[in-house]
Image: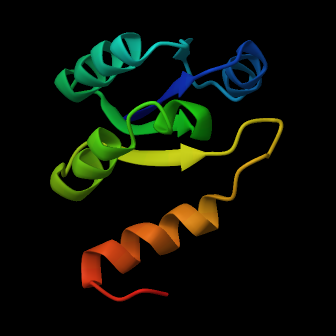
Amino acid sequence: MKFYLLSDNVDTQVGMRLAGIEGDVMHEREALMNALEACIDDETIGIVLITTKLVELAPDVISELKLNLTRPLIVEIPDRHGSSNVGEAINKYVSEAIGVDM
């Protein structure tokens, strides 16, 4: 099983490539959906890393995939700007899942 990166910027892609992780750069929702479908169909990909800005293009779809897929594991990562708080997103998912406002 391998990692795969879906990023909105080249800097993140270059950094991950230095760590041996291949990936694609995109900026459109349609490209993200196509790349996610390809990752799901590829049996060798075990973990998909997606930058926060890409998750914001399709939060409902990403959330649904995280909840229902056993493979690949989809992990949101902050980009180099670190402008968004992944912890808040996790709190939101948990709150929605258990029906409690945190």
Quick check: 93 above or below 84? below
Compare residues 39 and 102 and report the one nearer the observer.
Answer: 102
Q: Quadrant of residue 16?
A: top right
| Residue appearing at x 62%, y 21% in the figure | 8
Residue 20 percent coordinates (x, y): 63, 24
| Residue appearing at x 74%, y 17% in the figure | 14
Residue 6 percent coordinates (x, y): 51, 24
Horizontal side of residue 33 vs 54, given as left or right: left
Q: Quadrant of residue 99?
A: bottom left
Horizontal side of residue 83 vs 78, given as left or right: right
From the image, which quarter does the N terminus lie in?
Answer: top left
Residue 56 percent coordinates (x, y): 50, 38
Residue 94 percent coordinates (x, y): 38, 76
Quick check: 54 above or below 63? above
Horizontal side of residue 30 vs 70, given as left or right: right
Count every numbered label the image shows and give the total. Answer: 0
Compare residues 62 and 5 and report the one nearer the observer.
Answer: 62
| Residue appearing at x 60%, y 34% in the figure | 53
Horizontal side of residue 79 vs 47, given as left or right: right
Q: Quadrant of residue 96?
A: bottom left
Quick check: 86 above or below 3? below
| Residue appearing at x 53%, y 62% in the figure | 89
Q: Residue furthest front?
A: 101
